[in-house]
Image (cartoon, rainbow, N blue to C red):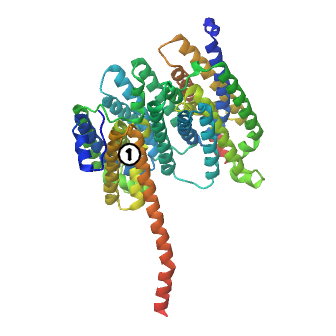
Amino acid sequence: MNPQFSWDLIADVQQMLSYPFMVNAVRAGGIVAGVAGVVGWMMVLRRESFAGHTLAVIGFPGAAAAAWLGVATGYGYFAACVGAAVAIALLSPPTRPGGLGGFAEESAVIGTVQAFALATGLLFVSLYHGFLSDLTNLLFGTIAGVSSRQVALVLVAAVVCLGLLAVIGRPLLFTSIDPVAAAAHGVPTQLVATVFLVVLGIAAAAASQVTGSLLVFALLVAPPAAAQQLTARPGLGIALSALIAVAVTWIGMGCAFFSPYPIGFWVSSFGYGSYLLAVGYRAGLERARRRAGPRQAQVSQMATT
Amino acid sequence: MMAMLHHAFIIHALIAGTAVALLCGLAGYFLVLRGQVFAGDALGHVAYTGAMAALVAGLDLRAGLFAATIVTGLGLGAGSGKRSDDVAIGSFFSWVLGLGVLLLTYYTTHGSGNNGTANVNVLFGSIFGISEHATVIAVAVSAAAGLVLFAIARPLLFATIDPAVAAAAGVRTRLLDALFLALIGATVAEATQIIGALLVLGLLAAPAAAAARLVSRPWHGFWLSAALAAAAIWIGVSLAYAIPAAPASFTIMSTAAAIYLLTGLLGGREHVFRAGAAVG
């Protein structure tokens, strides 16, 4: 395979989609990115981005174990991430307002869990005696090797994930914005937080299949953070976040297809780039508003006198 | 088991490993107390990219490691005054890691006759691949960093437990912040060669958190943390020697995690996290 890039973009896309493995990759990537954009928006709002990262890292030994056992790595990611999400939800004390991070000992525990998960993944990879590129692919993502069955698996996971999110959506938004008031209104905050953690596990596992375990921030955090810079309205923000994530993934896949460089680099660069653009746009908007502010005040003052 | 000590590579692994573990334990104790474990995570990401950049440029791997981590450590320390949110920091360091992958691909596709294992060695370390020369460097770096840490230890503890009072008493907390994170940078760079950029975090956090659980006096915890880290290396190396299928980085990290888990089960209620909260 030696695709040649031309500036005729339509021909490029046609060339890319003439390979069945790329069709699968584009389908799976689109589904995954859409879910990551939606779930990630909620996650960033709840300030649980490191929980998402930790869950994805725990996915790595799952995927490596699946490779060792001869099962598709997709199952490994989902089993490990969802299992870890349930474990965290069950083990965490009920008084804590959800999420990981903050308190000094907690961050030490997260660090230990992450390092241990990565070390366990290393064990499975070395037991598997795989090629060195397998390790790189699990950690940093790949576009090759997505089968039609894995596309179906990702689709089922996406439906489950978005279905659960739709059920808990309104109370989740309420507890995320004002936990005290939500609890006072009889919202079962603990249950909602637990269900969301499982949803996050599914989304993290899905995102890992595009970006690898280490670069999930690119899909799960950067597009939602960019969307939140651009708009504060939940509906618009979630749509925008999903849109950015899908665009980042598909453009990243195109670049990875036509260049020798891996998808992890492209997706993380475009994801981070979209976040920077959004931050810059908002800063520019605020500066313009500040500059316009005093002049408007003057005008209104002149009008009153 | 004594037959293990007849191999030169085991001796090198134990000497270099102990030196690095002592430093990780001592520096990690402050890192955990100060709630800056994520700085260790970030520096691990930067270490990977730095090492890959050095390989692409044809330099010694260590040059890239130390330059990248120490500069980033200073930068993090200088920026720690203003509170930046975790989304911005996390996205940035995730992108840095992505950049490392780009450099890795460039290195493996454009380099001629280079070893393809460099990636795994930087990510997960190669304690059994440490040469005599590297052992000497590891001991020297650990000793130098240890001396700097001892020199700033007292004001650092003061600034950690009560930053406001320390600043009022004339402790230069900003300078201390930057110096400490630069020191963590050097620690991460040296430890990356032993246990890998991805696992340094565990060696910094697990023994320190265990020590902080076991004893409530800071200085006792400080030394205990170093001892536990060294124990993790010794037990881990022995296990890796006894079980050839298990990589040394896995056995070391498992030992460190097991030590923390044990203290979690045994540990008393009155540990330094709560004591610190009571003081502050």
Q: Which residue is mark 1?
A: A219
Q: Position of residue A92 (x, y in %)?
A: 46, 38
Q: Which quadrant of the structure image shows residue A206?
A: top left
Q: Position of residue A275 (x, y in %)?
A: 43, 54
Q: Position of residue A130 (x, y in %)?
A: 39, 21
Chain identifier of the residue bearing label 1 in the image:
A
Question: Residue placed at 46% from the left, 55% from the top?
Answer: A276
Is any part of residue A183 visible from this angle?
no
Label 1 crowd bin: few (<14), some (14–19), many (20+), radius 10 Å: many
Is any part of residue B89 visible from this angle?
yes
B236 relative position to A16: left or right:
right
The answer to which of A213 and A160 lies nearer the viewer is A213
**Which quarter of the figure is the N terminus of chain B placed in?**
top right
Q: Which residue type does callout 1 highlight?
A: Leu
Question: Residue placed at 71% from the left, 31% from the top?
Answer: B220
Above/below status of A183 relative to B69: below
Q: Which quadrant of the structure image shows residue B259?
A: top right
| Labels in figure, total | 1
Q: Position of residue B237 (x, y in %)?
A: 58, 17
Q: Residue furthest bottom?
A: A305
Question: Residue placed at 49% from the left, 29% from the top?
Answer: B119
